[in-house]
Amino acid sequence: MICVLKVCLVEAVVVYGLGFLALAPLLGCRLKTLLLAPLGSYGLLAALGTVYGLLSVPGNPVTMVFVPAALLGVLLAARCARGLEDTRPSLRRPEGRDLAPWIIAALYGACGLVVTWRVLFAPMAGAYDLIQGYDGVYHVNLVHAMAASGDLSSVSQGIYRAAGEGTVLQGAPSFYPAAWHVVATLAMELVGTDVVAATNGSILFVCGLVLPLSTLVFFERLYGRRPRLLAMGCLVPVMFAAFPVSCVVGGTWYPVVLSMALLPAAVAVAMAFVDDLTGAETATDGTRRADSRFLAGRGTGLGTLSVLLAIAFVTLALSQTSAVFALGVFGVSYACFSLFQAARRREAAVVAACAVVLWAVCYKLPFLQSLVHYQWDAFASPEQAMANLLLLSPSAADVAQPLLGAAVALGLVVCLAERRFRWLVAPYAIFAAGYVATASSEGLLKHLLSGFWYTEPLRMGALVVVASMAVVPVFLDRAWSVLVGRREFGCVARWASSLALAGLFSAMVLAPAVAVYGAGDHVGAFGYWEDRVARATVQNLDRVLPADERAFAARVKAEVGDAVVLNVPDDGSCLLYGLDDLDVLWKRDSDAHPELREHLDRYAADPEVQRAVAETGAHYVLQLDQGNLDGAGMYHTYRHDNWAGIDAVGPTTPGFTEVLSEGDMRLYRIEALG
């Protein structure tokens, strides 16, 4: 697992280092700049890769990391030399209260890394084990294609770009948010490892470090000078199984995880922007805006916050575009709340009305139609959907978290009672309504509320989690206050008792299993996901490409070299491009070349099939599950009728010669016809 840790460390240096250099001229050399660095670096790297791609300049660590870092360093040094106080680095050792923010930031990062490692990587057999989800196929292949081609663009991307003659399946260039892939590719090249270790290291970094520190920025902006609330929330970002764990293991939605990990910090920026724009003199906790450690200070005026918000917008769009709409939900909710609290109710109504109109306009935009009308079928009754919501188990694959769900529900009640936190109920209610609509109904309301997130219940559940995070420390603080009552405690005792309560609650939520007297062990949500990871990697179960097929693929690569290989992608061979650099024609399920998919066995007698083979330049045929016609052990998109021609190729089929054979795995050479 050393290589996974190396990738995580390299990404931390690149993302936080480059982002710090980019944002320091705006925010100064402070802790706030470091914590917000991913908002700058992910967008910068994705945008830079796109510009290089359009100019046909290869993207690599030199052009993408070292040159920009040098230029940004020179710019920052020049601004410091001009005597700008906010950008001049402070070499003074932090003392007293100055040290507290650093300790809390370190606590969030350490808790995030430990829990993420324990749940996602400790159960793995090794660093080179991959969670083989369907969506992960595209991400793994795209990272490999980027590294092979040097094209890190988000507007001309595809998994066939660096392939051999199989580029006939590429299609027209299209936009795909590739910030996660760009950083993973650069880390893979800097460390000198393979795509699996790069993927795992990137997951560890995003879930274990970016998400907790991004949430800390949001918490600090929300809670103000209440360090006890911040400390009690150090485990909250990794306390929910529905996000990020379920999205990583169950969905392999790496760009989605990145965008939602960045979302809390972007919300904090939006809150600061709204406060400055509306001219509110106090934050929602009653303290002046200048009291906020991370997003205030000299030079952080409306102009600076406008630029920072624009940067956050671009970064979210290049990470996973749907996150922009989530940022809008949070931002508008907070803006309406701020205006309403300032007795500017008419302006609040105007902002809300404009937001509704803009939502409707976006819903009708032509280039978003494939997104908002994407169909995920309902799977539950409205009552069951609401129960899933309260138990934090948004999909059929999730295990309920009743204790945490109760904390969220009670925390929402506390927020309604406390004016400064009341606005948090609005985004939660919107995302919750979207989840219930998409999980339990069909029709316009489903697509209107959840269409910007593919009407996917798990994605809506993840948004509910993000909206719930800030509620849990509020509940814990109120529970602590109730338990303590009017008792007089010293400062140390107050801190110790509050942290003990938060620690006990966290341990109960994160426990993989709980022993119930007379009923044995009850497996919790995290125990369930740990078992899922172990089954797939250690026990070699629940995976499309098991160890024997990986070994056979290595023999195939040695035999065919760089030749194009016809394949049935759903048998796991779609992963072989990213994992073993095997140029399989179909790197994902596709309708292209029906004459090959359905009639390849007629190659010797059918001129149309011969023409198609010549067009693709294919020389071999690979079968990893020969004779498996019911799709057992394959991806869910497999339909035998779509691949009948390749499935029917055998040792006696005219025009094919068997080269390798082991169990139900075959490699055939396509012979030239006289």
Image (cartoon, grey):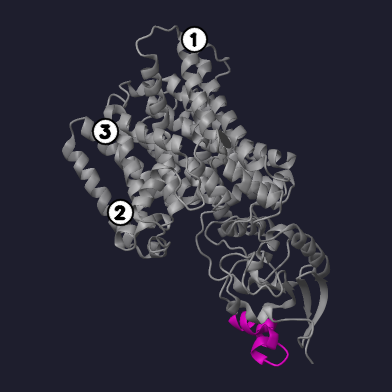
Residue 142 falls within the magenta-colored stretch:
no
Determine the residue positioned at 50% across, 45% down. Answer: 399
- Side of 438 relative to 152 (left or right): left
Q: Which residues are magenta?
A: 594-615
Judged from this view, the residue extending furthest toward the front is: 518
Q: Which residue type carries mark 2?
A: Trp
Residue 565 versus residue 4 in the image, above or below: below
Q: Pick the residue in front: 292 or 53.
A: 292
Instruction: Report the residue marked by disc 2.
Output: 359
Does the magenta stretch mainly form a helix, a strand or a loop?
helix
Q: Which mark is residue 492?
A: 1
Helix, strand or loop status at disc 3: helix
Measure the C-alpha gap from mark 3 to mark 1: 35 Å
> Mark 2 or mark 1, which is nearer to you?
1
Residue 241 versus residue 447 in the image, above or below: above
Q: Pick the residue in front: 512 or 206.
A: 512
Helix, strand or loop status at disc 1: helix
> Can residue 402 be seen?
yes
- Side of 417 relative to 440 (left or right): left
Instruction: Report the residue marked by disc 3.
Output: 338
Closer to the N terminus: mark 3 or mark 1? Answer: 3
